[in-house]
Image: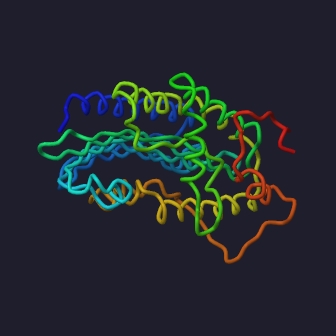
Amino acid sequence: MNEQKLKPVLAYLMHLQDQICERIESLDGEGQFQQDQWQREQGGGGRSRVMKQGKIFEQAGIGFSHVYGEQLPKSATAHRPELEGRDFNACGVSLVFHPNNPHVPTVHMNVRFFIAEKPGEEPVWWFGGGFDLTPFYAVEEDVIYWHQHAKKTLDAVDDTLYSKYKTWCDDYFYLKHRNEARGVGGVFFDDLNDRSFDDAFAVIKAVGDAFCDGYEPIVQKRKDTNYTDQQRQFQLYRRGRYVEFNLVWDRGTLFGLQTGGRTESILMSMPPMVRWEYDWAPEPGSPEAALTEYFLLPKDWANMSPGQGG
């Protein structure tokens, strides 16, 4: 295990989890995170924190994990076959927040670090991460702000990153079985090791540290918006897409399950309430239709102004 690289990353990730929990508890005003510390029999463990039935958040989960073992699972080696048979260390912070109000978007953020080792060979390490937004009743100015904040965050590290990571996010968070994006995107990256360790570490620190400043202003604007039961039902229906993506396509979920991670912690990203309806379609011209017909289509949001898209 490469302790020199691992120790500062673990310290950062645990501190990040603490910071975000403090910010979100302050934002919610009523809910508090409850911690569940767990150990993995094969090596490692983590601490899962969940807020239930807060004033703003119906459920908010944020987990830190550090697991290690003798062989990387198939979810990790499928796109990196040269790593098959290596020992591994994997650590990260991952969160998903599900608000009560349909006008407040669901949000996801993850930052992670892997080391794969084999006797007699140099360790292979890489970083990954990103954040993405999943609104139900999207507001153009919110989506533009979210992407402009993401671009500003990454530009401070390397002004070539945002465009690449934005496209990667659009491609990754896509439900192929429905030909539909999960949300309005953000940034996503994996296998980051094409620069020095310190420079790559700086990328995930930028993403982690910027998360709350990107999400909180949107929550503050929308948390007191009145909503109807019909809008609540639409929120529950669209949450179904979130569940479908996490269980069918998400590599992080598969990695956790295939490494024998704690199932409750892996699946705490799931919404507490959700619904499906057979062959449902929104009314033409409705806000519900606008979600899929306008907002979920890839756009250069960071370079748009409200109203520019029509």
Report the number of discs.
Answer: 0
Depicted 229 relative to depicted 151: above or below: below
Rendered location of residue 284, percent (x, y): 86, 64
Rendered location of residue 191, percent (x, y): 40, 43
Nearest the viewer among 254 and 52 is 254
Nearest the viewer among 295 and 65 is 295
**At x 31% / y 31%, what residue is drawn?**
9
Quarter of the rendering containing residue 223: top right
Nearest the viewer among 124 and 271 is 124
| 94 left or right of 137 in image | left
| 144 left or right of 213 in image | right
**At x 77% / y 56%, what residue is drawn?**
228
Rendered location of residue 300, percent (x, y): 71, 40
**At x 52% / y 25%, what residue is drawn?**
158
Q: Outermost residue, top direction?
A: 156
Depicted 45 relative to depicted 193: above or below: below
* Color style of the picture: rainbow
Q: Quadrant of the C terminus?
A: top right
Nearest the viewer among 161 and 91 is 161
